[in-house]
Amino acid sequence: MQNKPPLTTADGKTPLSSPKGQTSKTDIFSTLAKWLVLIVSIIPRFLASIMEHFTEAGSVGALALGSLVFVAGVLFTTDSYWQSLFQGAALFPFFEQSWAGWSWLPGFTVFPQPRAWAGIIFNPAFVFAVSLSFVIQIIQSATVRNAAFGVKAVAGISPRTVGLIAIASWTFDLIQTFSSRNPLQYSDPGDIFKCLMYNLFTIVAAELGYVVYRMLKG
Protein backbone atom coordinates (compact mmCIF):
# COMPACT_ATOMS: atom_id res chain seq x y z
CA MET A 1 0.00 0.00 0.00
CA GLN A 2 1.13 3.49 -0.76
CA ASN A 3 1.16 6.01 2.04
CA LYS A 4 -0.95 9.10 1.37
CA PRO A 5 1.02 12.35 1.36
CA PRO A 6 0.42 14.61 4.36
CA LEU A 7 -2.09 17.43 4.04
CA THR A 8 -0.50 20.77 3.21
CA THR A 9 -1.61 24.35 2.80
CA ALA A 10 -2.10 26.03 -0.53
CA ASP A 11 1.60 26.81 -0.87
CA GLY A 12 2.33 23.09 -0.64
CA LYS A 13 4.84 23.54 2.13
CA THR A 14 3.23 23.92 5.52
CA PRO A 15 1.67 20.67 6.68
CA LEU A 16 -1.83 20.79 8.14
CA SER A 17 -2.36 19.22 11.54
CA SER A 18 -5.29 16.83 12.02
CA PRO A 19 -8.27 18.05 14.17
CA LYS A 20 -7.86 16.95 17.79
CA GLY A 21 -11.56 16.76 18.83
CA GLN A 22 -11.23 19.44 21.48
CA THR A 23 -14.30 21.66 22.00
CA SER A 24 -13.46 25.23 21.17
CA LYS A 25 -14.65 28.19 23.19
CA THR A 26 -17.07 29.02 20.39
CA ASP A 27 -18.66 25.59 20.64
CA ILE A 28 -18.99 25.96 24.42
CA PHE A 29 -20.68 29.36 24.12
CA SER A 30 -22.99 28.02 21.40
CA THR A 31 -23.99 25.07 23.59
CA LEU A 32 -24.60 27.34 26.58
CA ALA A 33 -26.69 29.66 24.43
CA LYS A 34 -28.81 26.75 23.20
CA TRP A 35 -29.41 25.54 26.75
CA LEU A 36 -30.29 29.06 27.88
CA VAL A 37 -32.80 29.46 25.06
CA LEU A 38 -34.25 26.03 25.84
CA ILE A 39 -34.68 26.85 29.53
CA VAL A 40 -36.20 30.27 28.84
CA SER A 41 -38.62 28.83 26.27
CA ILE A 42 -39.90 25.96 28.43
CA ILE A 43 -42.98 27.83 29.67
CA PRO A 44 -43.89 29.44 26.29
CA ARG A 45 -43.48 26.10 24.53
CA PHE A 46 -45.60 24.40 27.20
CA LEU A 47 -48.36 27.00 26.79
CA ALA A 48 -48.18 26.73 23.00
CA SER A 49 -48.50 22.95 23.28
CA ILE A 50 -51.60 23.33 25.46
CA MET A 51 -53.08 25.80 22.97
CA GLU A 52 -52.40 23.37 20.15
CA HIS A 53 -54.34 20.65 21.95
CA PHE A 54 -57.31 23.01 22.38
CA THR A 55 -57.37 24.28 18.79
CA GLU A 56 -56.57 21.19 16.73
CA ALA A 57 -59.85 19.53 15.77
CA GLY A 58 -60.21 16.04 17.16
CA SER A 59 -57.61 16.44 19.90
CA VAL A 60 -58.36 15.70 23.55
CA GLY A 61 -58.29 19.39 24.48
CA ALA A 62 -60.57 20.35 21.59
CA LEU A 63 -63.11 17.70 22.58
CA ALA A 64 -63.02 18.88 26.19
CA LEU A 65 -63.45 22.51 25.14
CA GLY A 66 -66.27 21.68 22.73
CA SER A 67 -68.08 19.66 25.39
CA LEU A 68 -67.72 22.52 27.87
CA VAL A 69 -69.13 25.03 25.37
CA PHE A 70 -72.06 22.71 24.63
CA VAL A 71 -72.86 22.21 28.34
CA ALA A 72 -72.68 25.98 28.91
CA GLY A 73 -75.07 26.55 26.00
CA VAL A 74 -77.55 24.04 27.41
CA LEU A 75 -77.39 25.71 30.83
CA PHE A 76 -78.01 29.17 29.33
CA THR A 77 -81.12 27.80 27.65
CA THR A 78 -82.19 25.86 30.75
CA ASP A 79 -81.99 29.01 32.88
CA SER A 80 -85.19 30.41 31.36
CA TYR A 81 -87.22 27.26 32.10
CA TRP A 82 -85.72 26.95 35.56
CA GLN A 83 -86.81 30.49 36.45
CA SER A 84 -90.20 30.70 34.78
CA LEU A 85 -91.53 27.20 35.45
CA PHE A 86 -90.00 26.47 38.86
CA GLN A 87 -89.30 29.98 40.21
CA GLY A 88 -85.69 28.96 40.76
CA ALA A 89 -82.87 31.40 41.36
CA ALA A 90 -81.19 32.65 38.18
CA LEU A 91 -78.28 30.46 37.13
CA PHE A 92 -76.32 33.41 35.74
CA PRO A 93 -76.03 37.00 36.98
CA PHE A 94 -76.67 38.70 33.62
CA PHE A 95 -79.67 41.05 33.70
CA GLU A 96 -80.82 39.65 37.03
CA GLN A 97 -81.52 41.23 40.41
CA SER A 98 -80.05 38.18 42.17
CA TRP A 99 -78.70 34.80 41.17
CA ALA A 100 -77.88 31.36 42.55
CA GLY A 101 -74.17 31.90 43.12
CA TRP A 102 -72.47 28.97 44.84
CA SER A 103 -75.77 27.22 45.54
CA TRP A 104 -75.22 25.59 42.15
CA LEU A 105 -72.92 23.08 43.85
CA PRO A 106 -73.28 20.71 46.81
CA GLY A 107 -71.78 21.97 50.05
CA PHE A 108 -71.93 22.11 53.79
CA THR A 109 -71.38 24.55 56.61
CA VAL A 110 -70.48 24.08 60.27
CA PHE A 111 -71.35 27.51 61.70
CA PRO A 112 -73.67 28.66 63.13
CA GLN A 113 -75.01 25.10 62.95
CA PRO A 114 -74.05 22.08 60.81
CA ARG A 115 -75.94 22.05 57.53
CA ALA A 116 -75.48 20.43 54.12
CA TRP A 117 -77.21 20.89 50.79
CA ALA A 118 -77.30 18.95 47.52
CA GLY A 119 -77.05 21.97 45.23
CA ILE A 120 -79.16 22.98 42.26
CA ILE A 121 -77.56 20.44 39.93
CA PHE A 122 -79.08 17.58 41.97
CA ASN A 123 -82.51 19.19 42.27
CA PRO A 124 -85.10 17.02 40.43
CA ALA A 125 -86.84 20.15 39.13
CA PHE A 126 -83.56 21.39 37.67
CA VAL A 127 -82.91 18.00 36.04
CA PHE A 128 -86.37 18.21 34.49
CA ALA A 129 -85.63 21.73 33.21
CA VAL A 130 -82.41 20.48 31.59
CA SER A 131 -84.27 17.55 30.01
CA LEU A 132 -86.95 19.90 28.70
CA SER A 133 -84.26 22.11 27.21
CA PHE A 134 -82.71 19.08 25.48
CA VAL A 135 -86.03 18.03 23.94
CA ILE A 136 -86.84 21.51 22.67
CA GLN A 137 -83.37 22.00 21.21
CA ILE A 138 -83.58 18.64 19.42
CA ILE A 139 -86.89 19.65 17.83
CA GLN A 140 -85.60 23.05 16.78
CA SER A 141 -82.34 21.61 15.42
CA ALA A 142 -84.29 19.07 13.37
CA THR A 143 -86.29 21.91 11.84
CA VAL A 144 -83.15 23.87 10.99
CA ARG A 145 -81.60 20.80 9.33
CA ASN A 146 -84.76 20.28 7.31
CA ALA A 147 -84.78 23.90 6.13
CA ALA A 148 -81.05 24.05 5.37
CA PHE A 149 -80.37 20.56 3.99
CA GLY A 150 -83.76 19.40 2.77
CA VAL A 151 -84.07 16.49 5.16
CA LYS A 152 -87.28 14.70 4.17
CA ALA A 153 -88.05 13.10 7.51
CA VAL A 154 -86.76 13.12 11.05
CA ALA A 155 -87.11 9.86 12.99
CA GLY A 156 -89.94 8.88 10.66
CA ILE A 157 -91.88 12.13 11.25
CA SER A 158 -92.83 14.19 8.21
CA PRO A 159 -91.19 17.62 7.76
CA ARG A 160 -94.57 19.35 8.07
CA THR A 161 -95.25 17.75 11.44
CA VAL A 162 -91.73 18.59 12.59
CA GLY A 163 -92.26 22.18 11.46
CA LEU A 164 -95.52 22.54 13.39
CA ILE A 165 -93.94 21.06 16.50
CA ALA A 166 -90.98 23.42 16.08
CA ILE A 167 -93.23 26.48 15.81
CA ALA A 168 -94.92 25.44 19.04
CA SER A 169 -91.56 24.84 20.73
CA TRP A 170 -90.16 28.20 19.63
CA THR A 171 -93.32 29.94 20.84
CA PHE A 172 -92.99 28.18 24.18
CA ASP A 173 -89.27 29.05 24.25
CA LEU A 174 -89.92 32.75 23.62
CA ILE A 175 -92.64 32.91 26.28
CA GLN A 176 -90.48 31.24 28.93
CA THR A 177 -87.41 33.31 28.07
CA PHE A 178 -89.08 36.71 28.13
CA SER A 179 -91.15 35.89 31.21
CA SER A 180 -87.95 35.08 33.10
CA ARG A 181 -86.17 38.26 31.91
CA ASN A 182 -88.44 41.04 30.70
CA PRO A 183 -86.46 43.69 28.77
CA LEU A 184 -89.18 46.26 29.47
CA GLN A 185 -88.27 46.27 33.16
CA TYR A 186 -85.47 48.66 32.18
CA SER A 187 -85.97 52.31 31.30
CA ASP A 188 -82.71 52.85 29.44
CA PRO A 189 -83.07 51.93 25.73
CA GLY A 190 -79.54 50.54 25.75
CA ASP A 191 -80.35 48.15 28.59
CA ILE A 192 -83.57 47.11 26.87
CA PHE A 193 -81.67 46.29 23.69
CA LYS A 194 -78.92 44.39 25.51
CA CYS A 195 -81.43 42.34 27.50
CA LEU A 196 -83.33 41.59 24.29
CA MET A 197 -80.14 40.37 22.58
CA TYR A 198 -79.24 38.28 25.62
CA ASN A 199 -82.67 36.64 25.58
CA LEU A 200 -82.31 35.77 21.90
CA PHE A 201 -78.87 34.35 22.61
CA THR A 202 -80.17 32.08 25.37
CA ILE A 203 -82.78 30.69 22.98
CA VAL A 204 -80.13 29.47 20.51
CA ALA A 205 -77.28 28.94 22.99
CA ALA A 206 -77.60 25.15 23.12
CA GLU A 207 -77.64 24.83 19.33
CA LEU A 208 -74.62 27.12 19.00
CA GLY A 209 -72.81 25.09 21.65
CA TYR A 210 -73.50 21.90 19.72
CA VAL A 211 -72.22 23.47 16.49
CA VAL A 212 -68.98 24.45 18.23
CA TYR A 213 -68.66 20.92 19.64
CA ARG A 214 -69.06 19.38 16.17
CA MET A 215 -66.47 21.76 14.73
CA LEU A 216 -63.91 20.96 17.42
CA LYS A 217 -64.66 17.25 17.27
CA GLY A 218 -63.52 17.20 13.64
Image: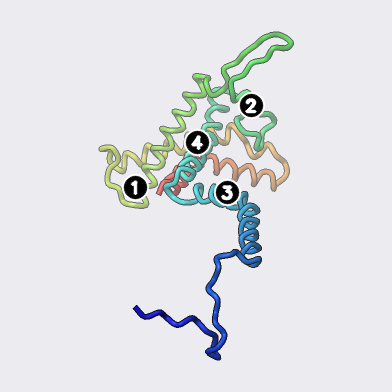
Q: Earlier in the sequence, mark 4 or mark 1?
A: 4
- Eye-nearest disc, 4 or 3: 3
Q: Earlier in the sequence, mark 2 or mark 3?
A: 3
Image-quadrant location for residue 97? top right
Q: Earlier in the sequence, mark 4 or mark 3?
A: 3
- Eye-nearest disc, 4 or 2: 4
Mark 2 burial class by Cα count in 10 Å: few <14, some 14-19, many 20+ = some
| Pointer 3 residue | 46
| Pointer 4 residue | 71
Q: Secondary structure at mark 2?
A: loop
Q: Earlier in the sequence, mark 4 or mark 2?
A: 4
Q: Position of residue 213 (x, y in %)?
A: 45, 44
Seen as rendered, the residue at the extreme left is 156
| Pointer 2 residue | 100
Q: Earlier in the sequence, mark 2 or mark 1?
A: 2
Q: Secondary structure at mark 4?
A: helix
Q: Position of residue 81 (x, y in %)?
A: 52, 29
Q: Secondary structure at mark 1?
A: helix
Q: CA distance from mark 2 to mark 3?
A: 36 Å
- Eye-nearest disc, 4 or 1: 4
